[in-house]
């Protein structure tokens, strides 16, 4: 079984698509901070553009919840805005339009795309090296891949048979 947590409108075949704010019959209404699945029961957790929406003091427990449901050998894929790259381009903005474009990528849409903005605020920033180190140190994750493109990063981390 595969989960697409915080799927928004990115509904994928072959996944259980979970979101708290999307009213689509193909989406399971679910707070992804507390998943209704048994320990070690899921093959893959896909978390695209959701982790940054959790507060700075909460995101670690959210990742621990996603890690809890993963089977050994399963993987967690996380995509998130690259705060290092975004801070550099924001510093180089020379027009109001540029500033607003990059500022939106850092702080989220806040209502300019989904309803009245529920869930569309970015609360925490990440970089590839920071999240890779956190997953490896905290969970013993094997980092399968880490790529950055268009000011987003994607990390694929595999759960080992033994978690620290």
Image (tube, rainbow, N blue to C red):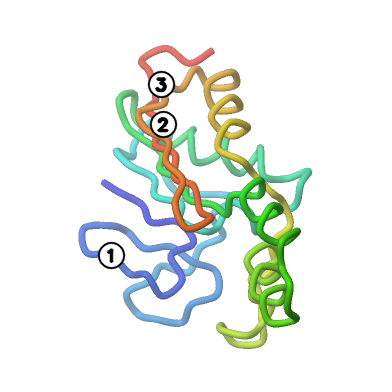
Task: Using the rendered image of the protein, determine whether residue 84 is visible from the camera's viewpoint.
Answer: yes
Residue 12 location (% of width, % of height): 28, 65
Q: Mark 2 touching mark 1, by CB under 8 A?
A: no
Front label number (2 vs 1): 2
Q: Mark 1 touching mark 3, by CB under 8 A?
A: no
The 10 Å Cα crowd at callout 1, few under 14, some 14 to 19, many 20 or more, is few
Q: Mark 2 touching mark 3, by CB under 8 A?
A: yes
Q: Which residue is painted at 75% across and 52% down in the image? A: 55
Residue 153 location (% of width, % of height): 49, 47
Q: Secondary structure at mark 3?
A: strand
First of labels 2, 1 by sequence position: 1
Q: Which residue is painted at 29% across and 38% down in the image? A: 43
- Distance from label 2 to label 1 (Cα)? 20 Å
Task: Using the rendered image of the protein, determine whether residue 38 is visible from the camera's viewpoint.
Answer: no
Q: Which residue is mark 2?
A: 157
Q: Secondary structure at mark 1?
A: loop
Q: Which residue is painted at 48% across and 69% down in the image? A: 29
Where 15 falls versus 103 (above or below)? Answer: above
The 10 Å Cα crowd at callout 3, few under 14, some 14 to 19, many 20 or more, is some
Front label number (1 vs 3): 3
- Distance from label 1 to label 3 (Cα)? 25 Å
Where 68 falls versus 150 (above or below)? Answer: above
Image quadrant assignment for residue 134:
top right
Q: Nearer the viewer, residue 40 or 44?
A: 44
Q: Secondary structure at mark 2?
A: strand
Where 67 falls versus 160 (above or below)? Answer: below
Q: Mark number for residue 142? A: 3
First of labels 2, 3 by sequence position: 3
Q: Mark number for residue 12? A: 1
């Amino acid at each position: 079984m595969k989960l697409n947590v915080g799927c928004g409108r990115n509904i994928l075949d072959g996944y259980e698509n979970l979101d708290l704010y999307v009213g689509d019959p193909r989406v399971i209404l679910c707070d992804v901070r507390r998943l209704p699945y048994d320990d070690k029961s899921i093959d893959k957790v896909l978390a695209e553009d959701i982790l940054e929406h959790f507060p700075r003091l909460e995101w670690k427990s959210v990742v621990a919840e996603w890690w809890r449901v993963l089977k050994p050998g399963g993987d967690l894929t996380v995509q998130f805005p690259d705060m290092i790259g975004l801070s550099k381009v924001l510093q180089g903005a020379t027009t109001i339009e540029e500033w607003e474009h990059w500022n939106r990528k850092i702080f989220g849409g806040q209502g300019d795309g989904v309803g009245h903005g529920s869930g569309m605020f970015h609360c925490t920033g990440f970089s590839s090296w920071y999240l890779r180190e956190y997953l490896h140190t905290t969970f013993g994750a094997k980092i399968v891949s880490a790529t950055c493109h268009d000011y987003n990063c994607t990390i694929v981390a595999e759960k080992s048979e033994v978690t620290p």
